[in-house]
Image: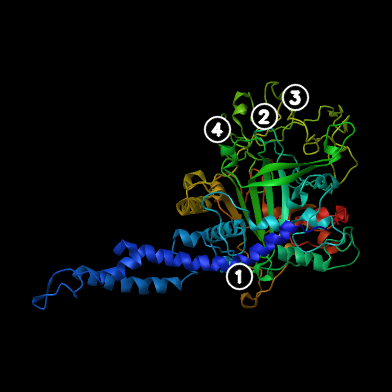
Amino acid sequence: MTLSKKSLKQRQRAFASRIPAAEKSDKTTLAGFDRGLGQVFPKGLDGLWSLQQEKTPRRFMGTSSPQFAPARASFVQLLIAIVLIWTLVALTGCSDSHDGTTEDLLNYKLPGDVDKTPGNASQSEFDEFSWQSFLALSAPSVGGQINADGDNTPQWRDWSSTTDLLNQVNPGPYGSRFYPEECKAVPDYEDYRVIDQVGKVDDSVEEATEAALSTSPVIDKNGNFLRYEILISPALYDQVVSNGWNVPGTIPTDEQTGPVMGDIIGNCGLASYTGGDPADKGCGFIQIKNAWMDLTDSSDEERAKYHIEELLVYTPAYRTSTTPQAATCELRTMGLVGQHIMHKTLTQPAWVYSTFEHVDNAPDCEGPSTTGGSQAGTPSDLCPETVQKDWNFYPMLCNDDADSSAIDGCPDDTPATNQCAHCNDTPNSNDPTATCMSDGDEWVGTGCIRPDSSTTDPPSACKEGTEPWCLDLDPAAVKGFSRLCRQVPVSEDETKGGYTSSARLNRVYHEAIAAAGNGNSVWANYELISTQWMTKDFAEDPAARKCLNVSRQVIQYQNGSAYVGLKPFIEPNPECLGGNQPVLGNTSMESYERSNCLGCHAKSTTGAGDFDTIFSNHASTDFMYWLKLEVPYSAGTDNP
C-alpha cells in the first residue's frame, strides 16, 4: 500500500480550498452586484458616492445653489441604486434555484439525488443531474469549479481505482495506489496513477474478463489501443474495505447450498444532502469508468482539446511480442475520451447511469440496427461511407476502403487494401503469429495471448472477442483500425429520433462554459449522450423510503436465459429507430454492442450456475460488476 506525498498534499489543498471556494462565491455575487451598478454608474460604487460631491449649478427653490445641491440625475441614480441593492440582496438568498445564469450553471453542485419520486421525474431532470455531477466531479476539489479557460485536475484524480484496492493485502485510506514492479522503475512513479485495462471489462493486472460482454479493444486514429480504469468514490472505497468485500472469499464465488451471506447494499445518495462531498455517505456510492487515448505524440493543438493526464500505462508480459515476453510500464500523455458515472441514490436504487464522451469520437450512424430489439441483435452497421475529418474512432484513412458495411466477423471477405474494420465491428488481431485452426476450435502459435475466465490460454475457440492482441505492435495491415459510429444520435432535431433532452442541455452548458472563460475550456468538448434511470418506484412506502438492493426486482430469468424485466426510462421514443429501447452506448466503451447499462449491471451476481436459480444460491453485488468480475482474481499482493 502506498499513499504518495503528492496525494497527501493534494488532499490538504482540497480541504483548504473549500474555504476560498466559499469566499469566491461571495466575491462572485459582489462582482455581479458591481456589474449591475455599472449599468447605472459607469464609475461603480466610488462613482456613486462621488456624485454626491458634484457641484452642478441649477435652480433650487427659486435660487441658484451651486455648492450643495446635487444634480437631479444623481438623485435619480441614487434611488435606482437603492432599489438595485435590495433586489440583489434578495436574489443572493436563492442560491438553490436555477436562474439560467452562467455562474449558476457552473457553480459546484454535486447532487445526492433527484428530488422527485421516480414516477414524477423527467428525462431532462436526470440529464441536468448528470451535467451537474460531471462538472462537480471534474472540479479540482469539493466546492471548486472547472477551469473555464483551459484544463484542470479533477477531484477524482485522487480516488483509488479498483486495481489499486484489490491488489493490496491491507488497503490504506482511499487514494492508496498499487504499482507493479515495472512501474516503480519510472522516476517519481508515486505521482501518477496506473492504467492497465484494454477493454471495458478486461483487467490486465488481474487477468479478469467477462465472456458475456465484448472485451475487444478500440484502436484509435493514431493506431493506439484505448486504455481504461474504474475509479471508486471515497465513501464507496471505505465501505468496501470496512466490510471486507475486497477480500477473496468474503463474497462467495461458488454455488452455495444455502444463504451464506445476504446481498450487498450500497449507500444511497440523499436529495437532502447538499454538501457535495463524495467522501460523505450522504452523497451515495459513485463509480467512474474512464476511457483514455494516447496523445503522447500528438500536437499541442490536438492536446488542447482534451483533459490531459500523465499516466503510467502498464502492459503485462502476455500481451507483448518480445522474446522473451516482458511486462512494460511507460509514462504517457493520455487524453480523456469517455466517462461513465454511476451513482446510487435513494429514489434510484438501481443506480443512475450517466455517460459522456468527447465530441470528436465518432460520427452518427446513418440508421438503426437492422435487427432491432432492446438487447438482442447486432449494432448498426450503417456508418457514413466517407468522413470529412479525422474522428478518433473513424479516421479519414478509412475513406479509401471498399465494402466496409457488413458485420460478419469474417476477415476473408475484406479487400486486402482495407485498413479499417467493418462498421462497429472488431478489428483484426495484430498478432502476426496467431492462426485459427481450420475447424475454428483453437488459436495456435500465438505470441500474445488474452486472458479468458473460462478456459486455459490460449482460448479454445476462435470466436470474436477471443483474438490475441499485441499491445506493443502497430494495428493489423488489413482491417486493423476501428471504424465506429454512434448508434443513437444526440440531436435537438426530433425527426432524427435521438437524445433530444441531452442535446439541448449540451448546448446550454457548452455556451455557459464558453461565456465564463476565453472559449478554450476542455470541458466544453465533452457531451452527455444520455442518462439511464428507472420510472419504477421500489419503495413500498415513499414516505419511509429505504436504501435497497433491487437486483432481484429488476432482473428476471426465463427459459434459462437472462433478460431485464423492468425497463429503465430513457429517450428516445422506442418507435423512432425501429427497435425497442433502451439503447445507451458510449462509442469509447460500448463500441461493438447494443448496450443497456442496467441490463448488464443487474446481472452482477457472484459465481456462475443455472440462470433459473442463480439468485437463490448466490449473492448480488448491488450492480457493482467489478466486485463480481475482479475480486475472485485479485492478486492481493502487498505494495509497501
Q: CA distance from mark 3 to mark 1?
A: 58 Å
Q: Secondary structure at mark 4?
A: loop
The amino acid beneath tag 2 is Cys
Q: Are marks 2 and 1 in contact (CB under 8 Å)?
A: no
According to the picture, the residue beneath numbered tag 2 turns out to be 420
Residue 309 is situated, as x and y percent measured from the top left of the image, at 66, 47
Q: CA distance from mark 4 to mark 3?
A: 29 Å
Q: CA distance from mark 1 to mark 4?
A: 43 Å
The amino acid beneath tag 3 is Asp
Instruction: Let me know if residue 611 appears in the view.
Output: no
Residue found 83% across the figure and 41% down from its top: 316
Q: Are marks 2 and 3 in contact (CB under 8 Å)?
A: no
Q: Residue furthest front?
A: 67
Which comes sooner in the sequence, label 4 or label 3? 4
Which comes sooner in the sequence, label 4 or label 2? 4
Q: Secondary structure at mark 3?
A: helix
Q: Which of 195 and 4 lies nearest the eye of the viewer?
A: 4
Name the quadrant of the C terminus.
Answer: bottom right
The amino acid beneath tag 1 is Gly
Which mark lies nearer to you, 4 or 2? 4
According to the picture, the residue beneath numbered tag 1 turns out to be 275
Q: Residue furthest top?
A: 416
Instruction: Let me know if residue 411 appears in the view.
Output: yes
Residue found 34% across the figure and 70% down from its top: 84
Disc marking residue 465: none
Q: Which of 355 and 370 lies nearest the eye of the viewer?
A: 355
Q: CA distance from mark 2 to mark 3?
A: 14 Å
According to the picture, the residue beneath numbered tag 4 turns out to be 389
